[in-house]
Image (cartoon, helix red, strand yellow):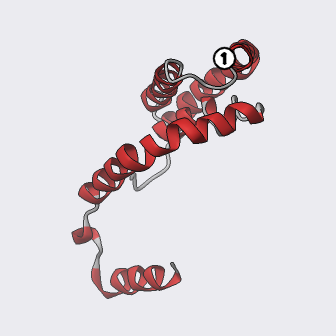
Amino acid sequence: MKGAFSWRWAVPRLIGLAAYLALVFLVLRTPLQRALANHIGRHGGLRLTAVPYVVTLLFISAAITSNLGVFAIIGGFVIGVGVVLHDDRRFVEEWKRRVSPIVWAFFLPIFFAYTGLRTDVGSIQGWPGALLAKWLERRR
């Protein structure tokens, strides 16, 4: 978290993100959708052998956005079930059936452990910060 906004920091990241989004949506989207539709049509569903390829693609996209200085989750969202591949309902259903158990059992606990370990309660300054934290906790 930075205390001040800087255009020198933000502009290159926004340009990089815009270029990456253009690449994904204008170049990669159609071939990815076509390849998945062909795979699902040929095999009657998403085979387990295809899941590692899709997950690897998600991780590569997350690494790209992370290296651009943007949250890694945005890269995964851009490629994954969020944007590019979400149009094919058959893929979405197969993805939920094949990958959701892995996410719930493996990735979600890692996410919460990582987030919890990075939380610094000592950074709350004074009573106003503590009251704000308590107020936010009650709103959940």
Q: Position of residue 125 (x, y in %)?
A: 29, 76
Where residue 30 sits in the image (x, y, percent)? 76, 16
Q: Is residue 23 above or below residue 1?
A: above
**What residue is at 51 percent from the left and 78 percent from the top?**
140
Q: Amino acid at mark 1?
A: His
Q: Residue at the spot x=64%, y=21% of the render? A: 19
Q: Position of residue 116 (x, y in %)?
A: 29, 59
Res 22 → quadrant: top right
Which residue appears at 47% of the width and 85% of the height? Answer: 138
Outermost residue toward the front in this view = 44
How many residues crowd mark 1 within 10 Å: few (<14), some (14–19), many (20+)? Answer: few
For residue 74, side relative to residue 129 (left or right): right
Tell me how many marks there are: 1
On the picture, is 32 further left or further right than 115? right
Residue that carries the numbered disc 1 in the rendered image? 43
- Please give the name of the residue rendered at 32% of the width and 48% of the height, measured from the top-left corner: 110
Up the image or down, 7 lies above or below 116; here it is above
Please indicate whether residue 109 sits to the left or right of residue 121 in the image: right
Name the quadrant containing residue 66: top left
From what the image shows, is residue 21 above or below residue 76? above
Q: Is residue 127 above or below residue 34?
A: below
**Residue 12 appears at what percent x and percent y?**
54, 28
Q: Nearer the viewer, residue 23 or 83?
A: 83
Compare residues 58 and 133 and report the one nearer the observer: 58
Image-based side of 33 in relation to 53, left or right: right
Give the structural element (helix, strand or loop) at label 1: helix
